[in-house]
Image (tube, rainbow, N blue to C red):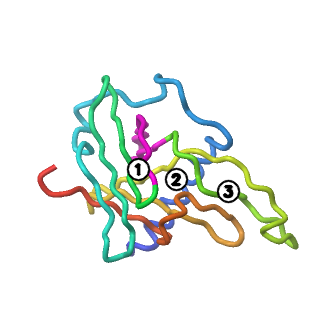
């Protein structure tokens, strides 16, 4: 399976998982993932490949018995606790981050501007155990319109853990 089709399939699953956070934040501490030895490999600093044009870093640490994050872009800094969903694929969700824009499915015959903006929260990264990368889809298309992080132009964001972390 080539990397593009793998990313596309996994991101569709991630989009379904994130759709549960439409219009609400996850604020209860019980929803965050507690420290677990099997997830210690995620602790560290993850950065986007600057050659692809993305300037973003994700720092994951242990704090108050949970995994905390700091997501930094050129314009914003987001902090909070993350949630890990570990099944056939592993997803790391930053639940408090509000998407830049979300209009969802655009009905046939309607213009983008005719569909109202809605609040959407949570950025879900898929962890690829083969490549040891975190990735997410930053924006949709004309049929499913959304932008998660406005200051990043890349459609697919791939983060790699810095050496020595």
Residue 108, magenta (yes or no): no
Q: Is residue 114 above or below residue 68?
A: below
Q: Which residues are magenta?
A: 76-94
Residue placed furthest toward the left: 164
75 or 139: nearer the eye? 75
Residue drawn 86% across and 70% down?
110
Dots 3 and 1: beta carbons under 8 Å?
no
Q: Which mark is residue 108?
A: none
Badge nearest the viewer, 3 or 1: 3
Q: CA distance from mark 2 to mark 1?
A: 10 Å
Residue tagged by mark 3?
102
Q: Which residue is mark 2?
A: 14
Residue at 50%, 64% (x, y): give it: 151
Instruction: State the image quarter where residue 86 is shown.
Output: top left
The residue carrying pointer 3 sits among few (fewer than 14), some (14 to 19) or many (20 or more) residues within 10 Å by Cα, namely: many
Q: CA distance from mark 3 to mark 2?
A: 16 Å
Are circles 2 and 1 on residues that touch, CB within 8 Å? no
Say if mark 3 contacts mark 2, CB within 8 Å.
no
Assign a secondary structure to mark 3. Answer: strand
Is residue 140 rendered to the left or right of residue 137?
right
Residue position marked by numbered label 1 in the rendering: 89
Residue 105, image x and y in percent? 74, 61
Of mark 2 and mark 1, the one earlier in the sequence is: 2
Residue 85 sits inside the magenta stretch: yes
- Name the side, left or right, on which 6 lies relative to 149: left
Q: Is residue 99 above or below residue 6?
A: above
Residue 109: x %, y % from top left: 88, 73
Question: Of helix, strand and loop, which mostly describes the magenta segment?
Answer: strand
First-in-chain label (3 vs 2) = 2
Residue at figure coordinates x 33%, y 60% from the top left: 159
């Amino acid at each position: 399976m080539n990397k593009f089709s793998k990313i596309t399939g996994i991101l569709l699953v991630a989009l379904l998982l994130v759709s549960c956070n439409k219009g609400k934040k996850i604020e209860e501490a019980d929803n965050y993932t507690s420290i677990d030895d099997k997830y210690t490999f995620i602790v560290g600093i993850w950065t986007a490949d600057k050659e692809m044009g993305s300037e973003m870093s994700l720092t994951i640490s242990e704090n108050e018995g949970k995994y905390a994050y700091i997501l930094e872009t050129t314009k914003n800094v987001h902090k909070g606790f993350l949630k890990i969903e570990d099944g056939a694929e592993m997803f790391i969700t930053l639940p408090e981050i509000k998407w830049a824009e979300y209009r969802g499915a655009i009905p046939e015959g309607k213009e983008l501007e005719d569909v109202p903006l809605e609040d959407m929260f949570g950025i879900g990264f898929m962890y690829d155990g083969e490549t040891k990368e975190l990735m997410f889809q930053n924006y949709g298309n004309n049929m499913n319109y959304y932008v998660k992080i406005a200051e990043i132009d890349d459609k697919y964001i791939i983060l790699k853990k810095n050496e020595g972390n």
